[in-house]
């Protein structure tokens, strides 16, 4: 916007009028009075015509483009990172792969070992045994062979042609991580129960097929893996999220 001022002016008197004033003006100065008057009048009018820019209004009008408001400096947004471990006895959310209502793989049709089972080149290892008790399911205790050393874990249940109903093998690891297993040279189908260090079952791979080199895991960290006959967990109501007690392991 701009503003304009009104200036009331009267023409300067001539030299004759000036000499008739109460204050006498020398003749030389009197001759300069008209020119000086014209100059002062031009400066005054020029000053009144100068453009005056006003600041933008606080609320934009239709004549002014929209101006984005400054970013808020209020409460910062909530963090979307991984929550830290809780304190005061409360446990941070843990990783558990829920057991589906129906198994992803069908129950095995085999009633015995896979006919393609290779011969055992050395015979089974002699392993210590322990017991697994299921605390939240109506399931019998299971007597397990303990595969603790690396060569014992690598061998596992390879070449076995049978295993008792309430028998199994438990693999004990030094490192808590997402463990992967396969069924290389394993002749009987199995359930694999992945168990965390506090005894929580974090996931179950059911009905793993015989003589299969695919890997099986539940995507959650664990410290133990318990192998049982295929279908055992579902027959006895054992699902992920339940707890077990390990004795002698």
Image (spheres, helix red, strand yellow):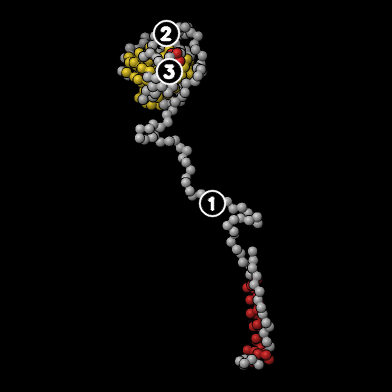
The percent position of residue 69, horizontal first and vertical second, equals 56, 51
How far separated are the C-alphas under marks 2 and 1? 73 Å
Instruction: From the image, state whether disc 2 or disc 3 is nearer to you.
Output: 3
Q: Position of residue 94 (x, y in %)?
A: 42, 29
Q: Name the residue under label 1.
A: 70
Residue where numbered disc 3 is placed: 238
Label 3 environment density (alpha carbons within 10 Å; few <14, some 14–19, many ≥20): many
* Displayed quadrant of residue 181: top left
Q: Residue at x 65, y 76 (%)?
A: 7
Q: Position of residue 143 (x, y in %)?
A: 35, 13
- Give the class, few, some or many, for how many residues have Cα within 10 Å of label 2's Cα (few <14, many ≥20): some
Residue identifier under label 2: 161
Other residues around mark 1 within 10 Å, as few (<14) / some (14–19) / many (≥20) = few
- The residue shown at (31%, 18%) is 248
**Tag 2's secondary structure?**
loop
Q: Which residue is at 42% across, 19% downward?
A: 193
Mark earlier in primary sequence (3, 1) = 1
């Amino acid at each position: 916007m701009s503003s304009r001022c009104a200036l009331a002016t009267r023409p300067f008197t001539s030299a004759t009028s000036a000499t008739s004033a109460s204050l006498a003006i020398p003749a030389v100065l009197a001759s300069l009075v008209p020119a000086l008057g014209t100059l002062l009048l031009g400066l005054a009018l020029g000053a009144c015509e100068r453009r005056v820019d006003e600041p933008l209004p606080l609320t934009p009008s239709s004549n002014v483009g929209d101006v984005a408001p400054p970013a808020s400096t209020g409460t910062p947004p909530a963090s979307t990172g991984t929550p830290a471990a809780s304190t005061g006895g409360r446990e941070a959310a843990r990783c558990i792969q829920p057991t589906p209502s129906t198994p992803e793989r069908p129950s095995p049709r085999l009633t015995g070992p896979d006919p393609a089972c290779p011969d055992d080149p050395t015979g089974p290892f002699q392993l210590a045994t322990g017991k697994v008790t299921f605390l939240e399911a109506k399931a019998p205790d299971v007597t397990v062979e303990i595969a603790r050393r690396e060569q014992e874990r690598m061998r596992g249940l390879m070449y076995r042609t049978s295993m008792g109903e309430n028998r199994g093998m438990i693999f004990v690891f030094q490192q808590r991580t997402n463990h992967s297993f396969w069924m290389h040279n394993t002749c009987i189908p199995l359930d694999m129960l992945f168990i965390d260090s506090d005894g929580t079952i974090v996931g179950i791979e059911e009905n793993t097929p015989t003589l299969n080199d695919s890997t099986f895991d539940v995507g959650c960290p664990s410290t133990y893996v318990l192998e049982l006959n295929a279908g055992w967990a579902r027959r006895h109501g054992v699902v992920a999220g339940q707890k077990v007690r390990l004795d002698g392991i």
